[in-house]
Image: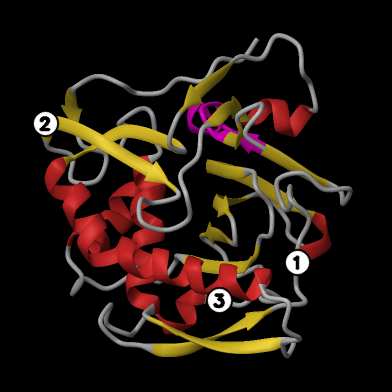
Amino acid sequence: MHYIKIRNQGSGNCNICGKAAPLTWDHIPPRGGIDLTPVEMRSIFQLLTGATEGYKFVESQNGAKYRTICKQCNEIMGSKYDTVINSFAISVGKYLRTALTLPPVLNHPTRPGALIRGILGHLIAVKVQHDQVAFDKNVAPAVLDESSPLPDDVFVYYWLYPYETSIVIRDLFISYVPLGVKGFFLCHLLKYFPVAYLVTDKPFFRSLPELTNYRALSPRDEVAIPIYLKSVMPLNWPETTDDCHVLLGGESLQNSVFAVPKRGKR
């Protein structure tokens, strides 16, 4: 059996700054973007294995959420980054819902520096245990201080995700044969309608548009980035696929979740 562990104590060490403090909720998707509806959060192992028996789920009335960050870090996320993430999601969602015929590629204005830092901040927040692994330590300074540069070994890719299931995966080690990869590389996934994000330590996904092409920009700088409307991956890509690859993960993977609309709310 696999149980979802949701850190729910009122105080502890903040996942982002590391300080001991009262903890607040971090929501996936962030508040203020798409509607946060009741969901059933299930272990990612159910998704990876296709099993249905013996798996427990946790209900949440307003999307997937984790009580893991302090009020100060939550305010940084909300004021500096979530507004950009939400604006981007709302705009891309309109492209997917429109009845108009659109060109296959649209150039959409956003602030990639803020978008990247917001994605990284939420990926740190979704860790149930405060273990301060290398990835968290490397990216936290850029989340806390917008003038701090992004690490050179962090690559963030994005693609359209027209599905109602939200998927959050941390610390997934993957050997992906179609990419000609020998050995394993680390990746993290944050996927919810209408955009999915993949963060990795190796530039192996060059066929996807890359946010970190704009890593040198300030979070305040706005540019137009491409939205490929015809490029849609399967719901469970790349964590499950018919291609030959191997997955490894530790406790963080064990606590990763996918959230589906609550029964009767779909």
Task: Please name the residue that numbered disc 1 is placed on.
Answer: 232
Magenta range is 248-257
For residue 216, side relative to residue 21 (left or right): right
Label 3 or label 1, whichever lies nearer to me, is 1
Residue type pointed to by label 3: Glu
- State the mark number for residue 20: 2
Asked which secondary structure carries label 2, the reply is strand
Task: Please name the residue that numbered disc 3 is placed on.
Answer: 210
Which of the pair 61/227 is nearer the observer?
Answer: 61
Asked which secondary structure carries label 1, the reply is loop
Residue type pointed to by label 2: Ala
Residue 135 visible in the current orientation = no
Question: Are there few (<14), some (14-19), or many (20+) residues within 10 Å of tag 2?
Answer: few
Instruction: Residue at 77%, 77% (x, y): give it.
Output: 230
Residue 219, how many percent across, how many down? 28, 77
- State the mark number for residue 67: none
